[in-house]
Amino acid sequence: MSDTTTMLGLKMTTDPRWVALVETNISAILTDHAWCEQKAASNAISTIVRFPEHLDLVEELTRIAQEEIEHFGMVVERIKERGFKLGPERKDDYVGELLQFIKRKCSREEQLVDRLLFAAMIEARSCERFKMLSEKISDPALAEFYRELMISEAGHYTTFIGFARKYGTGIDVEARWQAFLDYEAGIMERYGKKETMHG
């Protein structure tokens, strides 16, 4: 298990062969990545809409939403540079499965904590994938691009975890986070086989 995986708490490392698969279709991975950034921005905004009472959370999520949409533009620029086209939005099966773990009929506090841990989980896995791309992809420009994004995603992960701990005062946030990690590890046994960011 890599140092990054351990640092993020992830319980399963992406199979390195995923990078070789990605390199067979750079256009597909860039399109998928662009839409991942757009969805991350949308998720931050929808969390603001649902939980506007925490102003410090609203401020941080506003910053994150702006950063994610900026990343969307940066990925689109890479697509343009390589003569590709931005393909249609793709369904993210990994995120769909992760969503199923979020509690539905629970307190408002639990809803907020689960939503924050859900976002932290996606950021953690994205960070791990970006690190792998930065170290193993053969395109030097993309390697540097993903190294920069890896640092940003790690910061987002820390922010989401931090707010879950702050506002989950009546919840065992650490136990819930470990449950998320266990569930995500089970999901990951079936992934790493597609040229998509979470596939």
Image (spheres, helix red, strand yellow):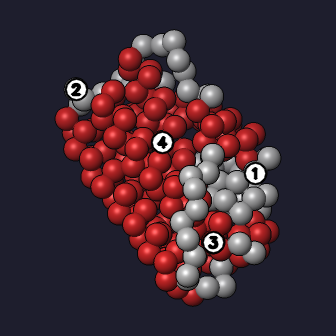
Q: Earlier in the sequence, mark 1 or mark 4?
A: 4
Q: Name the residue under label 2.
A: 53
Q: Residue at x 51, y 12 (%)?
A: 105
- Foreground pick, 192 / 159: 192
Q: Can residue 127 be seen in this view?
A: no
Give the percent coordinates (x, y) of residue 26: 65, 74
> Which amino acid type is marked by label 3?
Ser
Q: Residue 191 carries which label?
A: 1
Q: In which quarter of the image is the N terminus?
A: bottom right
Q: Decide which of tag 4 and tag 2 comes sooner along the chain.
A: 2
Mark 3 to mark 2: distance in Å? 41 Å
Which of the two marks, 3 or 1, is nearer to us in this view? 3
Q: Which of marks 3 and 1 is nearer the N terminus?
A: 3
* Residue 107 image point, x, y percent: 42, 13
Alpha carbons under labels 4 and 3: distance apart:
26 Å
Secondary structure of residue under mark 4: helix
Residue 27 got which mark? 3
- Quarter holding residue 43: top left
Q: Where is residue 6 in the image (x, y as percent from the top left)?
A: 61, 55
In this rendered view, identify the residue nearer to me: 59 or 73: 73
Of the numbered discs 4 and 3, the one sitting upstream in the chain is 3
Mark 3 to mark 1 CA distance (whole Å): 20 Å
Q: Do the residues labelled 3 and 1 touch (CB within 8 Å)?
A: no
C-alpha distance separating marks 2 and 1: 37 Å
How much space separates mark 4 and mark 2, taking CA atoms? 19 Å
Q: Is mark 3 on a helix, strand or loop?
A: helix
Looking at the rendering, in which quadrant would you find the C terminus? bottom right
The three-letter amino acid code for the residue at tag 4 is: Ala
Q: Say which residue label 4 marks.
A: 119
